[in-house]
Image: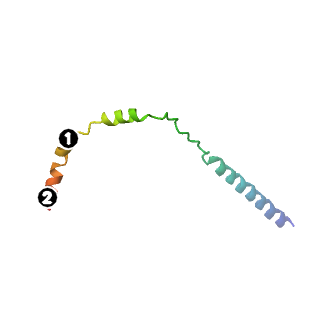
């Protein structure tokens, strides 16, 4: 009878320890993060056109001159 009690006590300690270990793992998991997107005001077409026209793309012909020469050699 003493042996059965010892086995039950060891088993009970193991189950309690395992439960505490699982509980600590759950507490370590990151919480859900709520991502909010910034509110954007609608742009009007005139403002978009002005922004596009203001972009400096440089001289595209000179940029692609070496690429055109390589393609012509093929």
Q: Residues within 10 Å of mark 1 (few under 14, many from 20)?
A: few
Find residue 29 and report its horizontal and vertical position in percent: 61, 48
Q: Nearer the viewer, residue 30 or 11?
A: 30
Viewer-closest of 41 and 35: 41
Relative to 44, 24 lies left or right? right
Residue drawn 81% across the image and 62% down it: 8
Q: Nearer the viewer, residue 45 or 72?
A: 45
The disc label shown at residue 12, or none: none
Depth check, front residue: 12 or 49: 49
The answer to whether 14 appears left or right of 43 in the picture is right
Residue 38 lies, in percent from the top left, at: 52, 36
Could you tell me which quadrant the C terminus lies in?
bottom left
The answer to which image quadrant residue 44 occupies is top left
Is disc 2 surrounded by few (<14), some (14 to 19) or many (20+) residues within 10 Å? few
Point out residue 62 in the picture as x, y percentages from the top left corner: 16, 44
Disc ID at residue 59: 1
Single out the residue that lies furthest toward the front: 46
Q: CA distance from mark 2 to mark 1?
A: 20 Å
Which quarter shows the N terminus? Answer: bottom right
Q: Which residue is mark 2?
A: 72
Residue placed at 64% from the left, 51% from the top? 25
Which color mode does the image show?
rainbow
- Return the disc, 2 or 1, that comes first in the chain's sequence: 1
Task: Assign a secondary structure to mark 1.
Answer: loop
Depicted 64 relative to depicted 56: above or below: below
Horizontal and vertical percent for residue 34?
Answer: 59, 42
Q: How many marks?
A: 2
> Left or right: 35 with respect to 22?
left
Q: Residue at x 75, y 55 (%)?
A: 16
The local secondary structure at tag 2 comes to helix
């Amino acid at each position: 009878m003493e042996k059965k009690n010892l086995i039950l006590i060891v088993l009970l300690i193991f189950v309690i320890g395992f439960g505490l270990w699982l509980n600590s793992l759950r507490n370590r998991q990151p919480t859900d993060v709520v991502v909010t997107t910034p509110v954007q005001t609608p742009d009007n077409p005139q403002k978009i056109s002005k922004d596009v026209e203001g972009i400096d793309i440089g001289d595209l012909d000179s940029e692609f001159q070496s690429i055109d020469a390589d393609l012509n050699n093929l």
